Image (tube, grey):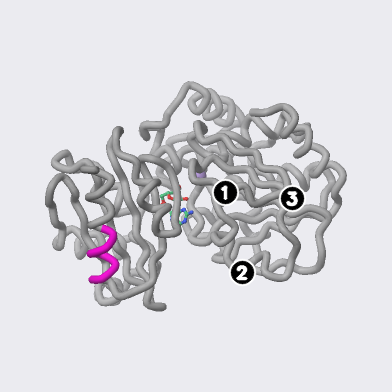
Amino acid sequence: MNKELIADAFDILHQAQRILVTSHVRPDGDAIGSLLGLGLALQDNGKDVQMIMADGVPKSFRHLSGSEQVHRKPKGTFDAIVVVDCSDLGRVGSVLDDLPDPDLSIDHHITNLPFARVNLVDSDATSTTEMLTALLPALKLSLSKPIAEALLTGLITDTLGFRTTNMRPQALRAAADLMAFGIDLPVLYRKVLLSRSYHAARYWGRGLSNLQLENRIVWTSLTLDDRQAVDYPGRDDADLINVLSTIEDADVALIFVEQKDDTVKVSWRSRPGFDVAKVAFQFGGGGHKPAAGAELEGPLDEVQQKVLEATRAIMHP
Ligand code: 5GP
Ligand code: MN
């Protein structure tokens, strides 16, 4: 990472007293892990930190220290505003509505739009938490066991347990360093990646029973009816997309999740050689070449049709 940018980030964080840290809506393990990792490290350094997430902390991450301090709305004013693991400002949700533009962004998405005054972006990093594992010491912020657990959570979830195609030695070294704080890796791995509710498994069943395959694209949808029928409390896909991405007959997997406000959440996964970030970006979303997402307006069938068409176009240009 660029030393001058790190020095700028150092100045922003160390000259501030009241600091807001936030991340994206529908937070995943990397968003929560980065928020808590940086937030707790700044608190240990004597800063007044507000950790804010528009959607709060999902149940599977509430065991992490500091998660009880995460609120949905900021209070008061700040000397510095930091956004982690977020490629565009819109994805922060309403958190920054009445606040100035962010001072610092720390992110690893290839589709990152440099929206902050200082942007630390490394699209080769597996996760923002991998970046922070190296960055915190460079920013003279020390790690502790709770910080290590938060950061390791993001590393595990964003790499699906160290198996995504962007894995690199730095990610395993970072994980080893974090584990050395006394973290039980298999226990954490199970909590944040493997364990799921009975309702989520039944929700998968609904999606899997409608699975379609055509020209090496596999896809399915999850409707509001599916959600209600199995009593699934979330508005996401319960990570079913990561099951679809294991199907060997396809190069690209897609899932369409119908939402209450006439929008559809779309997730893409692809094998090496296919860039789904490009197609997600066309629809106002973003992500990485092998894993991307977007939120589109319109009825499910229309969204499905236009997204499948655009996806075919990037596969067979
Ligand atoms: P997922 O499909 O699991 O929600 O996300 C896959 C990747 O795409 C993640 O890196 C996630 O941050 C990114 N992503 C998902 N949805 C959106 C979106 O609506 N906008 C942007 N910019 N990125 C997204
Ligand atoms: Mn991430």
| Amino acid at the residue labelled 2 | Ser
User: Which image quarter: residue 120?
Assistant: top right
Q: Residues within 10 Å of mark 1 (few under 14, many from 20)?
A: some
| Amino acid at the residue labelled 1 | Leu
27 sits left or right of 70 in the view: left
Q: CA distance from mark 1 to mark 3?
A: 14 Å
Q: Residue at x 79, y 53 (%)?
A: 80
The magenta-colored residue range is: 301-307
In magenta stretch: residue 55: no
The answer to whether mark 2 and mark 3 are in CB contact below 8 A is: no
**Earlier along the polypeptide chain: callout 2 or callout 3?**
2
Up/down of 58 relative to 83, above or below: below
Task: Select label 1 or label 3 by which is in front.
Answer: 1
**Earlier along the polypeptide chain: callout 1 or callout 3?**
3
The residue to which callout 1 is attached is: 113
Give coordinates of residue 164: x percent, y percent.
Answer: 37, 35
The residue to which callout 2 is attached is: 94
